[in-house]
Amino acid sequence: MLRLYFFISLMCLVKSDPDETCPSFTRLSFHSAVVGTGLNVKLMLYTRKNRTCAQVINSTVFGNLNMTKKTTFIVHGFRPTGSPPVWMEDLVQGLLDVEDMNVVIVDWNRGATTVIYNHASSKTRKVANVLKEFIDQMLVKGASLDNIYIIGVSLGAHIAGFVGKMYNGQLGRITGLDPAGPLFNGRPPEDRLDPGDAQFVDVIHSDIDALGYREPLGNIDFYPNGGLDQPGCPKTILGGLKYFKCDHQRSVYLYLSSLRENCSITAYPCDSYRDYRNGKCVNCGIPQKESCPLLGYYADHWKEYLKQKNPPMTKAFFDTAEEKPYCIYHYFVDIITWNKNIRRGSITIKLKDKAGNITESKINHEPAIFQKYHQVSLLARFNQDLDKVATISLVFSTGSVIGPKYKLRVLRMKLRSLAHPERPQLCRYDLVLMENIENVFQPILCPKLQM
């Protein structure tokens, strides 16, 4: 809550734009946020026929809305400045790119615009009632609940849940993008988003220590970078407004990345972020196992596997890069050592291809324990996926500033891709790593019978 109050206090004045030819998202000033706004819900339809100019629709005027196609509602959250969400246009266009559907923006900026978060929160059920009335009329015109999809951001995620409850969980799908935490944490299922609110509910938690909801709320709950501090976001208040909203908004940008062909973020079902980082939960995707869940738009491909679980709920973890499109590429680094004594430390691995591209992974979240003739499998995360690796470098470090320098005697090192298990595995034998000294070498293909 403290970060929320700081965020509100740092909001700056936003000026209104002149009227436009095409209907657009309601733009209000900071003055409106100070004095407060009464609730008014405006529905704006985009289709491939009118993807650049919205049609204002209601329960009697449906415009180009095709009742036989999927209808995706986008519901925003708290708007303390009155400005439109900066991500809205990209989300609309991205959805229309991947599927021929109806996209409806649920504009409740008049109601969400206020510096008092409690006032916006109190209007969420009323917004849900407006949506219910509209969907009822869609059903009369021949639409199906199976084809109703609601994407809710922050407070919008709970609005989606309220709508779903009114249809006894028969909506096709709900996606919650960092559902709001303040005033909702600890609330019973009837007062928030819940896994039973749709046939499939997926949630991305990107700010669980501040503006977002910590506990699972869906059939599958994704926790990027553990759901806490997101890479590339400011770590201190010196980052200005971005410090307060960057983690919270990252859920939206991660979802957007799933709509691009060049980025498919894989997540790994796991009990905890620590277990994921330690490589204990990356068996999905290998032969005889279920596929790994994908983040974002295609997350519902995993719902068939969820039906086998009781209850049909799971948590999934993954890491991201600092910048768009945020994809990370996972490899296992298997190391067998032959030191007489146990060594504890971290490994930094660097890959380079023939074109000179370099990518690096520091596996230092907790010390690895190297024992004689025992294989240690370390999960490495790279920002680039190099198809043909020419050289590999390893650095071993105990993290000690003073004291003796140690050697790590490597009997065998093996590099294997999780994203592309069909690629040849790369090996190197009989290495001696001097602490904090980079050892660069050319790998060789591992024997094919080697596991």
Image: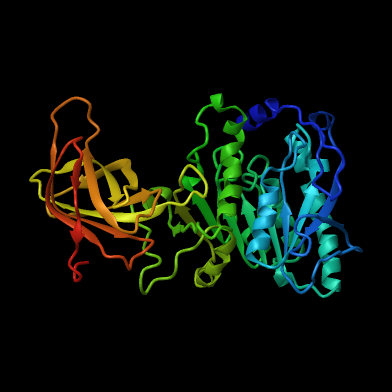
Locate residue 430, reporting x and y percent: 10, 52
Q: Is residue 338 above or below residue 264?
A: above
Identify the colour scheme used: rainbow
- State which quadrant residue 185 falls in: top right
Report the side of 196 relative to 388 (left or right).
Answer: right
Q: Is residue 179 visible?
A: yes
Locate residue 240, reporting x and y percent: 60, 27
- State which quadrant residue 50 falls in: bottom right
Q: Residue at x 68, y 56 (%)?
A: 93
Q: Quadrant of the N terminus?
A: top right
Locate residue 145, reporting x and y percent: 74, 70
Front-lying residue, 96 or 381: 96
Most extreme residue toward the right is: 60
Q: Quadrant of the C terminus?
A: bottom left
Q: Is residue 265 above or below residue 424?
A: above
Report the side of 267 relative to 212 (left or right).
Answer: left
Locate residue 125, reporting x and y percent: 79, 51
Front-lying residue, 159 or 449: 449
Report the side of 404 relative to 331 (left or right).
Answer: left
Front-lying residue, 320 or 368: 320
Tally of marks: 0
Q: Is residue 125 visible?
A: no
Most extreme residue toward the front is: 355
Q: Residue at x 13, y 36 (%)?
A: 406
Q: Is residue 298 above or below residue 443?
A: below
Q: Residue at x 55, y 63 (%)?
A: 299
Most extreme residue toward the left is: 340
